[in-house]
Amino acid sequence: MADTGTRKDGRQADELRQVTIERGWSEQAEGSALISFGSTRVLCTASVMPSVPRWMSGKGKGWVTAEYAMLPRSTNERMDRESIKGRVGGRTHEISRLIGRSLRAAVDMRALGELSIAVDCDVLQADGGTRTAAITGAYVALADAIAWAQANGRVPASAKPIIDSVAAISVGIVDGRPLLDLAYVEDVRAGTDMNVVATGRGLLVEVQGTAEGAPFDRSELDAMVDLALAGTQRLTQLQREALA
Amino acid sequence: MADTGTRKDGRQADELRQVTIERGWSEQAEGSALISFGSTRVLCTASVMPSVPRWMSGKGKGWVTAEYAMLPRSTNERMDRESIKGRVGGRTHEISRLIGRSLRAAVDMRALGELSIAVDCDVLQADGGTRTAAITGAYVALADAIAWAQANGRVPASAKPIIDSVAAISVGIVDGRPLLDLAYVEDVRAGTDMNVVATGRGLLVEVQGTAEGAPFDRSELDAMVDLALAGTQRLTQLQREALA
Amino acid sequence: MADTGTRKDGRQADELRQVTIERGWSEQAEGSALISFGSTRVLCTASVMPSVPRWMSGKGKGWVTAEYAMLPRSTNERMDRESIKGRVGGRTHEISRLIGRSLRAAVDMRALGELSIAVDCDVLQADGGTRTAAITGAYVALADAIAWAQANGRVPASAKPIIDSVAAISVGIVDGRPLLDLAYVEDVRAGTDMNVVATGRGLLVEVQGTAEGAPFDRSELDAMVDLALAGTQRLTQLQREALA
Amino acid sequence: MADTGTRKDGRQADELRQVTIERGWSEQAEGSALISFGSTRVLCTASVMPSVPRWMSGKGKGWVTAEYAMLPRSTNERMDRESIKGRVGGRTHEISRLIGRSLRAAVDMRALGELSIAVDCDVLQADGGTRTAAITGAYVALADAIAWAQANGRVPASAKPIIDSVAAISVGIVDGRPLLDLAYVEDVRAGTDMNVVATGRGLLVEVQGTAEGAPFDRSELDAMVDLALAGTQRLTQLQREALA
Amino acid sequence: MADTGTRKDGRQADELRQVTIERGWSEQAEGSALISFGSTRVLCTASVMPSVPRWMSGKGKGWVTAEYAMLPRSTNERMDRESIKGRVGGRTHEISRLIGRSLRAAVDMRALGELSIAVDCDVLQADGGTRTAAITGAYVALADAIAWAQANGRVPASAKPIIDSVAAISVGIVDGRPLLDLAYVEDVRAGTDMNVVATGRGLLVEVQGTAEGAPFDRSELDAMVDLALAGTQRLTQLQREALA
Amino acid sequence: MADTGTRKDGRQADELRQVTIERGWSEQAEGSALISFGSTRVLCTASVMPSVPRWMSGKGKGWVTAEYAMLPRSTNERMDRESIKGRVGGRTHEISRLIGRSLRAAVDMRALGELSIAVDCDVLQADGGTRTAAITGAYVALADAIAWAQANGRVPASAKPIIDSVAAISVGIVDGRPLLDLAYVEDVRAGTDMNVVATGRGLLVEVQGTAEGAPFDRSELDAMVDLALAGTQRLTQLQREALA
């Protein structure tokens, strides 16, 4: 199929949905952002906590961790709560770990000193791309929480804990054509689905490509990575504006 | 202490905090409302589901249930997620059951027919009164979900499943003085804390008074119920305006 | 409906079932009571433990907590064990918390010093009113455990940890008529069900009224509270006789 | 060490503690018994249920199962509840399975037809020998539940589901001397501890001997089995008297 | 660092460890393989089951699923069992899902018909690359289970459920140099770690690259994918020999 | 049925299946053995850990514990994993405790000093007698782990922690005839099933006899114990050869 024409929602193949970042949404958290990728809305809050997990204690280094969850009716059909099922599902675990790893790529743990920052990403409304929106918003909340820690004497004002920024976007092959930032209706039709996390400097932190339908070849992989890196560059710009 | 003068936030003893109801906040749910009582913000979504719990099946009646939860950083200190702890706490259970019972007082289950409505109340930000805000917002989401069900042929258009409205408010004795709609700083100082659920017609659905500090006498009980019934009457008016 | 005539079991509207308190039933616990409200039988044991929960440590104050449970065949149909289901149900949680709060209203935690008393209330046979029987019996077990702690040097003999007594009773509106101390057959027919916890001095500790059927009005609330306070006064007398 | 002299509580080596069986203790269960072996007290209730577990369905046979549990303060130090820990311990599992197997040895499942009997054995007070008291009391509850099922048409009156009785007793080697029916203070000093389940006809159902301290030789095994079979014979007689 | 010289264990950068596949290790399973990548040993068993999960029922299609686990002392330090912790960890979930998705890329679910194949991959000994060894061995077990199903009439002999093979390998950047098939000592030093799943035809099924240390650039991504595709091609050959 | 003739697999009544012990199977554990009783294969690994459980701390004594588990497809039909069910079953608990008690009978805890040894017994393939194979193999792994601890200075070289060996075997009454070391097909037909654990010196550690079908009499008990003690004597010899 030709790589021309617009998508259902009128976007070009390499176009992001409308992205908004409402920084400081929460009055309680040290850093927060309500981020939207189109209809996908994720509330990210960053909490500064005075200690590190036991296995890290005494090393003079900090830690950043993340938890992802979806509200039961964030999706088109209501899902059971994981608290009520009494166990966290595999997908939730997987995404929480991905967000945590991504954020840690932006932070110098030694400069942070022995404190933890927990970033909670709760999906209020889901329309595809919740994990990439979560990472992108979580970075903004994290940056503000670190600024708070420096302003409040928890981290020396002269330290430089932030070494880069991180943002993430999805790409996929839909009807043979690589598309950026899949909405839910595109995601379910995608033969291959890839999530890419990159830093503000354009380096790769995570590349996760999965053939949901037919396997993909090397040239499709290349095309998807190209699209994604252009997308994360634009998200980096939006993060900078939000944090300005 | 004299029963005069204003409170920390400038309110009179019998004054509600600013209440806002953002009806239809969710694009996914059949009914929804984002309600605020001051800084307390609760997202309520109502989901219409085609069947009833097994123990109710075959009776020609519907069911309404509710689940309450707090986001981990809705509060001043981050709380662990109940999904990760693997069990739902007693307070969460208690409030979920209270919301469910309150909503059922507004519905004629026979007119609903054999379908369920699950109302999720997720506290995005907490500053006292989360359960009463949840009940008040949940009714709005429920009313819209029932309207949806009637507009979409799930419930006969001629049926009258809604028989009354419900709203809830907290009252308490703080420094010997009965106050309406306690904010968190008031709640922690309250000797007695009471939650009252009432219908739009002014009848009582739930009265839950607890002496956290010193026990209370009969006249204090009466004063609290008086305050609360005036408060729920004003909330009823706000619900009507939101649903208009 | 007129407030005349007797009930199925021959009682007047304001009459308790036969209440017996077998103090010191257990050879193991520091305090214990097997209490009956008619066919409802609850075994209450109070255990003195040398420390307080971590969050209370170092404040020089004690703690009283309670756990409620039903034997699987205490009821007319066998229930699954909560240990086997792997989770404690909402109702169990709710009642355990209620009993704990009620007992704490009778104790000066500072006079107790840094020790805990855990009161277990296990329902051996259920016929309505299990939570109110549990509270009433638990107070007797608690008083004996505190006496034991004072006799055994765990609490100074000169301290006065007991500042009042607590007892509890249910009331309800059955066929439009307020009744005291509902048996199971009455409880299932009650439109409104209320549990009242009061001290020996006649002050209120908890008031929990729930419209299971039709909502109730202010005058019904008043009538139920009147009945309940007369009932708890009689239970207070029976507690005193048991402890004499 | 010579096999002479009495024990701490004045018993002979081959003497049971005082055994009492309060048949029909529960008003709710189809069969029940409160059994005491000295200070050990176990409430046994048998529940007749209209179906069998799925894996047995359609074979025309019945099933008998058992659950054992201890109240938290049945012992000298309070134990945490298994419901709160969220899991059933290994010892509890083991004893529940033992009771179930023992009871099934007394029943012709084909004569029972497709129904289940669940026997709950809840230890109200523990002083050694709780599992053997539980088995002995559970048989009485079971026999009454089967009688109820025959009297109420759930099992044909002409059927003979009961094919034998079962009773159980502990034996042990304490200070080199075999003793029957160990009390708790003897049990903790026993080098070897054995539980024997036998039928009314004197056949063996279970023999479980464990060297807690030093291993035991063949002649000690023989001596313990001899003592135990004499003990179960006396218990069989007491069961017959209770059921008469 | 120059891309020359051998590794600690004497391998070239693009060399696999010794791979052995012991097909048919289990007498119980319909298909099985004990696979080794050097000291990493994984037992893979495939079980044919007569039905599909409920959500797939009635669609005429089959299902393939996988579960991964490590024995507690497969690693250098003993890990607690997930059964005892009562919950499956995030890493376990993640890998189980990865294996399942990878295997499904090799199967035509419609040709399989309504039956499930569950592939268990239990790590007996771990020295890096357990998930890639698991996928590679699991395919052999799966192929045999499908052959069994066809030989035993569960799947028509004329059907072609196997549409391709799958194999997987790890690659990483260690001291700036891309290496194939990381042993544990290499894995802990790798700045970037990538797992690639590819089909026998050389198409990509999964690409999962993670910067554990410094982020990686586009040319490093390309070098790793090249190495991995050469590695999976050799594994494909070994699978063919094992299945011959 | 006469007590003559051979069994399905050609063995005499008092004959063990072929037993093999592959000592040192694991490269990771301090001691290990892969043991086979015919088709039953159990991997036993012993892990030396530097501390004891909290309740034993400070007593100058060591501890030995064991965990038993079956791989999901070790059996003829696949079983669900206990990690996924979220709870360990009663049978698993029971056998883990049995193995631990058995091993402790071989060790002088005071000579071991304050360290723990955890022995994991994972059934790779099951054909009856998994618990007895596990005990017999676990002793070999344990002996090697203790030798390792002495060679590596964790336990004084002059200490004598091993005071005896332990081995275990099953016996049963099949068609009225006592048989040694039951294979699965014999086990399911056995009226009585007994497991006996004995030391190398011929003393009894555990005797667990269960009437699965008809109860057994005293002479059958005696015959089974005789058979078992001869069997454990031969296993003791095989353990000595493996450890030589």
Image (cartoon, coloured by chain):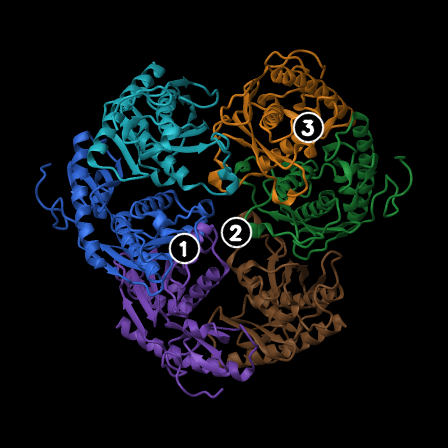
Chain colours: A brown, B green, C orange, D cyan, E purple, F blue
Above or below E145: residue C202: above
Return the x and y of residue C26 as percentages of the image width and height.
50, 24
Marks 2/3: CA–CA distance? 47 Å
Judging by the rendered image, the residue that carries numbered circle 1 is E52
User: Which label sits on residue B102?
Assistant: none
The answer to whether mark 2 and mark 1 are in CB contact below 8 A is no
Judging by the rendered image, the residue that carries numbered circle 2 is A87
The chain ID associated with circle 1 is E
The chain ID associated with circle 2 is A
| Left or right for C102, reference D4 | right
User: What residue type is disc 2 on?
Assistant: Arg
- Helix, strand or loop at mark 2: loop
Judging by the rendered image, the residue that carries numbered circle 3 is C159
Marks 2/1: CA–CA distance? 23 Å
Mark 2 or mark 1, which is nearer to you? 2
User: What residue type is disc 3 on?
Assistant: Ala
Return the x and y of residue B30 as percentages of the image width and height.
66, 51
Residue C167's quadrant in the figure? top right
- Is residue C180 visible in the rendered image? The answer is yes
Above or below A195: residue C171: above
Residue A151's quadrant in the figure? bottom right
User: What residue type is disc 1 on?
Assistant: Val
- Helix, strand or loop at mark 1: loop
Question: Mark 2 vs mark 3: same chain?
Answer: no
Return the x and y of residue B147 as percentages of the image width and height.
70, 47
Q: Quadrant of the N terminus of chain D?
A: top left
Question: Mark 2 vs mark 1: same chain?
Answer: no
Label 1 neighbour load within 10 Å: few <14, some 14-19, many 20+: many
